[in-house]
Amino acid sequence: MIAAVPDRGLCVAAALCGAAGVAFSAVATHSGGGPIATGASFLLMHAPALLAVGLLGASKPLRLAAWLLFVGVALFATDLIVRHYGAERLFPMAAPTGGTLMILGWLAIGVTSLLPRRA
C-alpha cells in the first residue's frame, strides 16, 4: 500500500484562511462587525476542511474540489473585506461568484466521496 502524500498547497491555503480569519475577526471585533465579520467567519469555517483534504493526500478529484472551495472562499471573503475598507468591491459579482464556487466545491466534495476508490 502506498502512503498518502499531503498536498502542501492545500495545507498552505488552509493556513492562510485560518490566519486571515483570525486577523479579520479581531478587526471585526473592534470595528463593529459587518461584512468583515462574515468574511472572517467564512475563512475560519473553511480552513479546517481545506486542511483535512490537504493532509489526507486525497484523490485528484477531491483535491480539485478543495481548490474550488478555496478559490470560492477567497473571492467571497476578499470582496467583503475590500468593501469593509471602503472600496466599491473587488469586481462586479465577486461575492456571489465566490459563494457559487463554494457551493460547487462542497457539492464536488460530496460527489467525490461517491466515486469508487482506486487500490
Image (cartoon, rainbow, N blue to C red):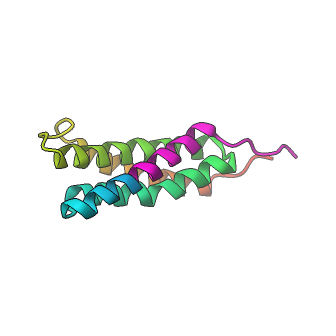
Magenta stretch, overall SS: helix
92 up-or-down from 109: above or below: above
Left or right: where does residue 116 sit relative to residue 52? right
Q: Residue at x 17, y 45 (%)?
A: 85
79 up-or-down from 33: above or below: above
Measured from the top left, where is residue 62 in percent x and y? 58, 47
In the rendered picture of this protein, how many numbered marks are placed on residues? Answer: 0
The residue segment tinted magenta is 1-21
Q: Residue at x 63, y 52 (%)?
A: 115
118 up-or-down from 107: above or below: above
Q: Magenta span has 57?
A: no
For residue 52, which quarter of the picture? bottom right
64 up-or-down from 19: above or below: above
Measured from the top left, where is residue 9 in percent x and y? 57, 37
- Regarding residue 103, the answer to whether it shows in the image is no
Left or right: where does residue 91 sit relative to residue 3? left
Measured from the top left, where is residue 30 in percent x and y? 24, 61
Q: Residue at x 26, y 59 (%)?
A: 28
For residue 44, which quarter of the picture? bottom left
For residue 113, which quarter of the picture? bottom right
